[in-house]
Amino acid sequence: MDRISDLLPTRVSLLDRAKSSKDNDSWNDLLRYYQPFITKILVRTGLRGTDLEDARQRVFLKIWNGLTNYERDESRARFRNWLSTLIRNAAIDWHKANRHTRMGTSIDFISEDSLDPDEPEIENAIESEWQKYIVEIAMERLKSVFSGKAFEVFALSLQGVSSDEIASQLNIRKESVYVLRTRVKKRLSLEIKTIRIELEGDASNE
Amino acid sequence: MLQMSESEKSYKRAFDEMESFISILYDEADPKNVDCEQSDLELAPMYQALTKIGERYEILEQIGKGGMKEIYRAFDLRSARHVAMAKPVSSLTKDNYDAFLREAHLTARLEHPCIVNLFDMGIDDGGIPFFTMELKKGRSLRELIRSARKNDSAEDFHLRKRLFIILRVCEAISYAHSRQVLHLDLKPENIQVGQFGEVQVCDWGMGVVVPRNEDGLNDSEILLDPDLYGPLMLHARGTLGYMAPEQRDPRSPKTIAMDIFALGCLLQELVTLELPDKAIRDQSAVDSPIKAIIAKARRDNPAERYSSVEELHQDLSRYIGGFSTSVERAGFLREVRLFYFRNRVPCLISILFLGLMAGSGIWFTKQLRDEHLKTEVAYAKSQESLLIAEEERSLANEARQRAEDAVAKHKRERELATVLLDRQIENSRAGAELLLDNLIMDNSLSLAAVENAFEHMDKALAEGAPNSDWFTAQKAYTLFLTQRFSEAEEYYAISVGDQSDLREIIPDFEKLVGENGILPVDDFIRLIQRIPATGRERNPLIEKMVVYDSLNRDSQLEKTRIIQAVLEMSNPNWRNQSFNFDSVSSHLSVSGEGFYSFFRKPALTGIDSAPNLNLLRMLNVRSIEIRSSSFADLAQLSELNLHRIDIRGTSVTELESLANISTLNMLVIEPDQFTSEQIVELPKRIAVEKRLL
């Protein structure tokens, strides 16, 4: 019963709802959020077309089955770990089965070697991709609150560009730069947190 | 994805630029991390501010002060704007709060772009009522006039601009009248002019609601009746110079004619940039139509003024638009010409007749002039005989000078004393003295003045003022003045100051005070005759004692005797005294040789700074008959509301000061006492009756 959850639209995370009830709506909501992410990772391991679709279905199925058994306990990142394991395994399975048919490589292709369960590379790639994904959703959701320019102000300030320079570069008042800088930061941070609670589960609830 | 909108590109750019910071952003927003949801204030400052407002108003500075209220500039945190906040002055108590709130209710009745807006009314944490009004950036008309006069450059405040201001004021007042509200305190101080020429009439504290019809006022209007609120409302009643003559009498019914008079004064001051304390004369700089408008609005007789603000407004806008006004003569001449052409024959006959009449008139005038020459010879003779009374005459002149000084001082000091009454200046000796002087200044304030003086001294004593001995003696003095002799003795016992003379006579009088708190008339007269005999100069005290006594004494006959006794002291050579006042007809007749002054004796030592006013005001004399060859100075009567003056048998030579007595309509003189020029120059309202003595 902390203050964070008061600020959220729903107090129970999407994940928890999908897990506990397995009703169609919560499940579909969850998929809608995870699907783009899962797709993105699978594409990066080299999957395309029907192969990609197959692998994705497999991952979903595993999530569906595993969700009931999945218990968050020691680590709050546990769900993500579990998820990346699922994705990785799906990719490995596919690569093993299709070694002979494999065509070329994509630029940021995750090498077959790196799919080795002991290699942290895929783990890291997934983690960073997830983070990016979350921030992207947060920004998307805040489009009704901040203009693109506002985000640019924030981005530039992150890079250490001075307020004067930001003001002249984006052609806005310096005072507004100050306001936007902090306001975007706060609001974005709040949104990321909200999304994290929704999609990763709220560890603090336990 | 053929085309990306500019804003989409912008989001994309921002995201790309954030790329390398994403894990930082992500980690900072850890749900376990409580820091990041800290201040919602920065996210939605306006909304958050609203939810957190405890105290709505933040008082910033005092920007004005009136008799009853103090005005502050305050910041309204809820609507994030500056407002003018009125609070009752600290001396007001719960009993006076309704009198204070009355203004807010009056203002709330009025919604007009040229009338200050009421925003809010309420009670603060301390239970003190307040109300807030629109606060416009701008200056009061008084300041504008002052700076226009100083710079001598009417450039940015030229006549046209000034006339537009008065038009706006007329519109506001006309509207208020349509809502049955009279302002009654119009003056430049109460008009705000904004940066863009917006005009606002403020300070409706003295306003009243007049009944719409025979049925009188409805319930909520009854609460706005100033009569409900006691002496406070009397205290603040109008401003000299802007106040219609009939308004000086607080009991006279309030009418729109009073506002119209003030609008005339306002117009005059705006046009001339001079205080309108006198009726407009031949200021050549002023266009005659404007002069005529001012004169009509300022007529002494309310019935002769404009009958509505609308009429005044019409005349002014006609003037501004270049048309002739209703009070101009041009229109009349045109009418005459038209009339002549319509009725040529009868007109010609009339003109012939008029010619004959004029001829005989000239002959008559010549005869009259000869007659007049004879009169002048007789007059010179009487002048000669007057020289005999030279000594008494010079005394009379002195008295006259004193009277004039006193009136001027009266005006000046009354202002000062009123300010002091408001401010309750801490521990100030001058404050206590001036408060007490209010006793003399204004009958409607007198008893309150004594109360205020007591309060002031008690406060000073309670707070242990450094000069507490002086205050103790002063309190004893005030108690003595109000005939509370036994109490006075208690304070004298502590500190007698320079008043041992007064203390000495207490034992002879303290037992004689009656149940009504005052001495029997004979004892009182004995007391005031005794006071100067103690060797000190106590004439100002005597006047105060007489005023206080008169206000508490019921019998007119006794009051008359007391005033006669005081006048006996200031007219030491008064022989064959006769001093009779008929309270039914309010007629006073004074006679006897050597009578020349209606004032108390001046203090002999030092400068007499105490006010000294005509003592007859205590009797409310309406008609006076003076028979004394030593009496020469009519200016002494200026402050009285006289209707009839009979000065046969006096040495009065100047009649000019009679113009100041606005109530006067009858003057009785001897046939040869004054020249016909002198009589012609008198205001028309004064009828002159010549009668032999």
Image (cartoon, coloured by chain):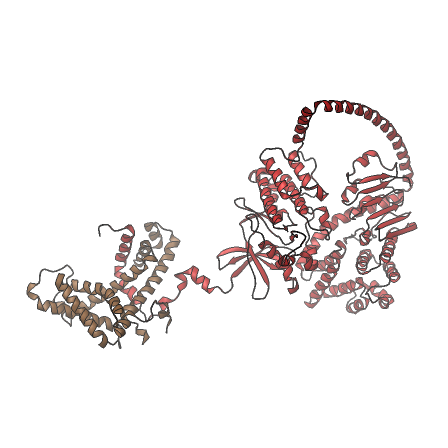
Q: Position of residue B15 (x, y in %)?
A: 27, 57
Image quadrant where residue B540 sits: bottom right
Q: Is residue A48 visible?
A: no
Q: Is residue B559 visible?
A: yes
Image quadrant where residue B223 sits: bottom right
Judge left or right: residue A194 versus residue B85: left
Which lettered chain is shown in brown?
A: A
Judge left or right: residue B411 versus residue B9: right
Q: Nearer the viewer, residue A153 or B286?
A: B286
Q: Tell how many labels.
A: 0
Q: Nearer the viewer, residue A121 or B209?
A: B209
Q: Position of residue B667 (x, y in %)?
A: 83, 42
Q: Nearer the viewer, residue B165 or B690?
A: B690
Report the residue that reaches farthest toward the left: A100
Report the residue that reaches farthest toward the right: B576
Q: Say which colour chain B has.
A: red
Q: Position of residue B312 (x, y in %)?
A: 63, 40
| Quarter placement of the C terminus of chain B | top right
Picture residue at 81% right of the left edge, 34% below the top: B677
Picture residue at 76% right of the left edge, 53% below the top: B609
Image quadrant where residue B59 sits: bottom right
Q: Position of residue A65 (x, y in %)?
A: 20, 74
Judge left or right: residue B27 versus residue B371: left
